Amino acid sequence: MRLLLDTHALLWWLAGDERLTRVARTAISKLENQVLVSAASAWEICTKVRLGKLPGAVVLAADFPGCLAAQGFTPLAISVVHAQRAGSLPGPHRDPFDRMLIAQAQAMEVPLVSNELQFDRYGIRRLW
């Protein structure tokens, strides 16, 4: 199975944070699963590190590709189709990073590993 990590799920996985549910941890750790990490998560993490809002992710921000490779995760680029879909999503949700992750999960028909209940209204499968 392929699955896409929300940014917080990636951070919690890397930190061994217990807020990541057992279901999410099991799915991420299964060797037969392809774990995708969006370029939107790199953008979000690097932005928040730069602004001082995420000091615990400085190492990740400095070598995002290396950290993904060390985990065996697959980087997911943002395509024009993803951008078009994200920009066209209905509803009041304003977070551009979340909108991109939703759009990518929709376009690729993959579950999104996230605790965000509001994502459910976008017709994606959310794994948590």
Image (tube, rainbow, N blue to C red):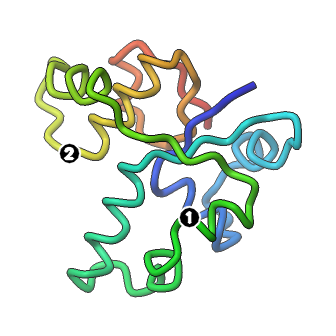
Q: Which residue is mark 2?
A: 95
On the picture, is 66 further left or further right than 62? Answer: right
Q: Looking at the picture, does residue 108 appear above or below residue 74?
A: above
Q: As drawn, which residue projects farthest toward the right?
A: 31
**Is disc 1 placed on a helix, strand or loop?**
helix
On the picture, is 68 further left or further right than 33? Answer: left
Q: Looking at the picture, does residue 95 appear above or below residue 108?
A: below
**Is disc 2 placed on a helix, strand or loop?**
loop
x, y percentage for residue 37? Answer: 54, 47
Residue at the image position 56 percent from the left and 64 percent from the top: 65
Tag 2: amino acid: Asp
Q: Nearer the viewer, residue 35 or 123?
A: 35
Residue at the image position 50 percent from the left and 19 percent from the top: 108
On the picture, is 106 further left or further right than 113? Answer: left
* Label located before the other in sequence (2 or 1): 1
Q: Quadrant of the C terminus?
A: top right
State which mark lies toward you, 2 or 1.
1
Quarter of the image where one finds residue 45? bottom left
Residue at the image position 74 percent from the left and 61 percent from the top: 71
| Disc sitting over residue 65 in the figure | 1
Q: Looking at the picture, does residue 101 appear above or below residue 37?
A: above
Quarter of the image where one finds residue 7? bottom left
Q: Nearer the viewer, residue 75 or 87?
A: 75
x, y percentage for residue 119? Answer: 37, 29
Residue at the image position 66 percent from the left and 62 percent from the top: 13
Q: Nearer the viewer, residue 33 or 74?
A: 74
x, y percentage for residue 57? Answer: 47, 79
Q: How far is the residue under mark 2 from the one under mark 1?
A: 24 Å
Q: Quadrant of the N terminus?
A: top right
| Disc sitting over residue 104 in the figure | none
Tag 1: amino acid: Pro
**Label 1: how many Cα within 10 Å (few below 14, some 14–19, many 20+):** some
